[in-house]
Amino acid sequence: MKQKQIIALVSATALVATALAGCGKTSEENTQTTAVSTQTTAVSEAEGTAKEDLPFSKYAETVTVHLGGSLNPNAKVPNGMSIEDNLYTRFLKDDLNIEVVYDWVASSSDFDEKMNLCIGSGTIPELMNVNAAQYRALLKYDMIQPLDQYFDDYASDTLKGYLESGGEELKKMYLQ
């Protein structure tokens, strides 16, 4: 169970970071400086930590994560790749021993409806993107576990900084 909670937190962190990444302007020089600073911080924080305790170390046993996906029907997918088999899913499998299984894939225009049907039937995937109303419904019906109890212990300083920069309203959205 703890392994799924950690995966859920890492995934939620990735979603939040992705959502917030486009919120500000940055120059290439600042990006490179930030990347070097982040790597240095990560290395210094990891010193003395057993490899298996690091957040992005490979799991000894395969972890299977079930997703609900959205795909733009007009998207150009490179030859030999699909939503189920691409550079990202291969990285997760090869480097972290995480297998991604899509329970369903809907067109981007049908995704919200499909997600609402899943919430109504109680058959939600383990990881998914939801809108604010769907998120509140999932919390209300105890279909997901709030992340606030894990945030202080597991969220990176970078993610904590993003949420701090967004003020109390942003924190309320993600930490209920």
Image (cartoon, rainbow, N blue to C red):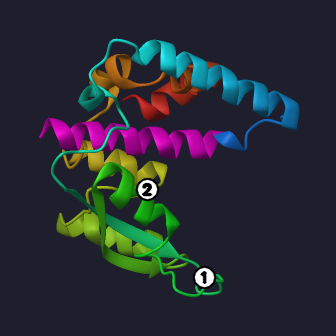
Q: Is residue 60 above or below residue 73?
A: above
Secondary structure found at label 1? loop
Quadrant where the image shows the C terminus: top left
Let me know if residue 48 is in the magenta part.
no
**In this picture, residue 163 sits left or right of residue 104:** right
- Give the label, 1 or 2, closer to the camera: 1
**Residue at x-position 20% and y-position 48%:** 141
Residue 27 visible in this rendered orientation of the protein: no
Q: Is residue 160 above or below residue 125?
A: above
Q: Position of residue 59 (x, y in %)?
A: 23, 45
**Residue at x-position 77% and y-position 32%:** 32
Of residues 48 and 42, the one drawn nearer to the viewer in this rendering: 48
Let me know if residue 4 is in the magenta part.
yes
Q: Position of residue 162 (x, y in %)?
A: 60, 26
Q: Are marks 1 and 2 in contact (CB under 8 Å)?
A: no
**Residue at x-position 51% and y-position 66%:** 87
Among numbered discs 1 and 2, the one appearing first in the sequence: 1
Kindly identify the amino acid type of the residue bearing the numbered disc 2.
Answer: Val
- Residue that numbered label 1 is attached to: 77
- Which residue, as the protein is rendered here, is positioned at the far left? 1
**In this picture, residue 162 sits left or right of residue 70:** right
Q: CA distance from mark 1 to mark 2?
A: 24 Å
Residue 28: quadrant of the picture: top right
In the image, which residues are magenta? 1-20
Q: Position of residue 157 (x, y in %)?
A: 51, 18
**In this picture, residue 96 sits left or right of residue 111:** left
Secondary structure found at label 2? loop
- Residue that numbered label 2 is attached to: 130
